[in-house]
Amino acid sequence: MMDRRQFMTAAAMGVAAGIVKVGFAQDGPTRLDAGLRPYQVVAGVSGNASSIGSDTLNNLMTFWAESFKKFYPNVNIQIEGKGSGTAPPALTSGTAQFGPMSRAMKPTEEDAFEAKYG
């Protein structure tokens, strides 16, 4: 469970990176579906995951990985931040499962990904 300081740090990083979008309807904050059940940890999750992309988002990805490993300690997560331009090729080639970017994908990057995965 995330404490207040951790939450505020993650929120500040998200806002600074432009990835957190807070939506407000005319009647107030957006509400979650009341039928949405709490997350259930599952057994037997293990393996490797790789994040290649924006160095701007390294701290946020590290925070996420540390929190994820509390639920799934047998998952090894590698984080490499060398710039947003490294994310699309890594995702397209399959060398990364996560491609954090601090900018939108360029049309050529989208085209390459869509050509491979649809």
Image (cartoon, rainbow, N blue to C red):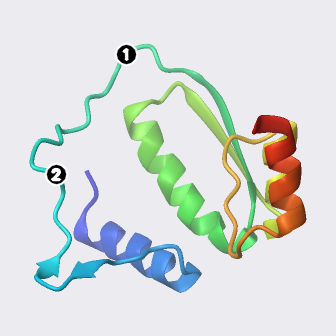
Residue at 42 percent across and 48 percent down: it is: 67
Pick whichever, 9 or 40, lies toward us. Answer: 40
Q: In the rendering, at what x and y percent does residue 76 appear?
A: 62, 33
**Mark 2 packing: few (<14 Cα in 10 Å), some, or many (20+)?**
few
Query: Which quadrant of the figure contains the C terminus?
Result: top right
Q: In the rendering, at what x and y percent does residue 5 appear?
A: 30, 73
Q: Secondary structure at mark 2?
A: loop
Residue at 55 percent across and 21 percent down: it is: 46
**Mark 1 packing: few (<14 Cα in 10 Å), some, or many (20+)?**
few
Res 89 visible:
no
Residue at 68 percent across and 74 percent down: it is: 102
As shown in the figure, which amino acid type bears the numbered disc 1? Ala
Residue at 49 percent across and 54 percent down: it is: 64
- Say above or below: 59 vs 66: below
Spatial separation of the CA atoms under disc 1 and disc 2: 26 Å
In the figure, residue 99 lies in which quadrant? bottom right
Res 45 visible:
yes
- Say above or below: 101 vs 88: below
Q: Which residue is mark 2?
A: 33
Q: Which residue is mark 1?
A: 43
Q: Secondary structure at mark 1?
A: loop
- Sequence-wise, the earlier of marks 1 and 2 is 2
As shown in the figure, which amino acid type bears the numbered disc 2? Asp
